[in-house]
Amino acid sequence: MSRQFPCNKCGQCCRNVHLAVETRPLDRGDGCCVHLDTSSNECTIYDSRPDICRVDVQYQTNYQHQYSWDEFVSLNVQVCDYLNSIKKE
């Protein structure tokens, strides 16, 4: 992998778990992840978070045969940009 995923810890992926089938089980009822500390935008179980929340694991498990790492990062950055465009506090 040539570059690290550029997460800025905005928390928008964790505030919108209801939008993806794979993350819906994490929804606390308002679209936010049950493990998100909304005051800090940090995951309360970061070190043991599910694989669906790990960009590198998702790539290696599901996407490395479809995309290069750089392509996968770019696609995920596009999703980040979208989530920030529909931002909810």
Image (cartoon, grey):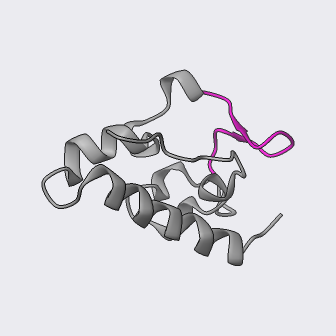
The residue most toward the front is 2
The relative height of residue 81 versus residue 8 in the rendered view (above or below) is: below
Which residue is drawn at the image coordinates 83% and 39% (left, top)? 40
Q: Residue at x 55, y 59 (%)?
A: 17
Stretch of the chain drawn in magenta: 33-45
Query: Where's the N terminus, which quadrant?
Result: top left
Q: Residue furthest top?
A: 47
The image quarter in which residue 57 lies: top left
Q: Give the left or right position of residue 52, taking residue 82 as reference.
A: left
Q: Is residue 53 left or right of residue 84?
A: left
Identity of the residue drawn at 64% across and 44% down: 34
* Rendering coords of residue 71 (x, y %): 33, 61
Tell me: 30 left or right of 71: right
Where is residue 59 shown, x and y percent of the image?
Answer: 29, 47
Residue 43 is a magenta residue: yes
* Residue situated furthest left in the rendering: 65
Q: Report the residue at 51% width, 70% height from top.
A: 78
Q: Position of residue 14 (x, y in %)?
A: 62, 52
Where does residue 2 sit, x and y in percent of width and height? Answer: 35, 41
Residue 3 image-quadrant placement = top left
**Chief secondary structure of the magenta portion:** loop
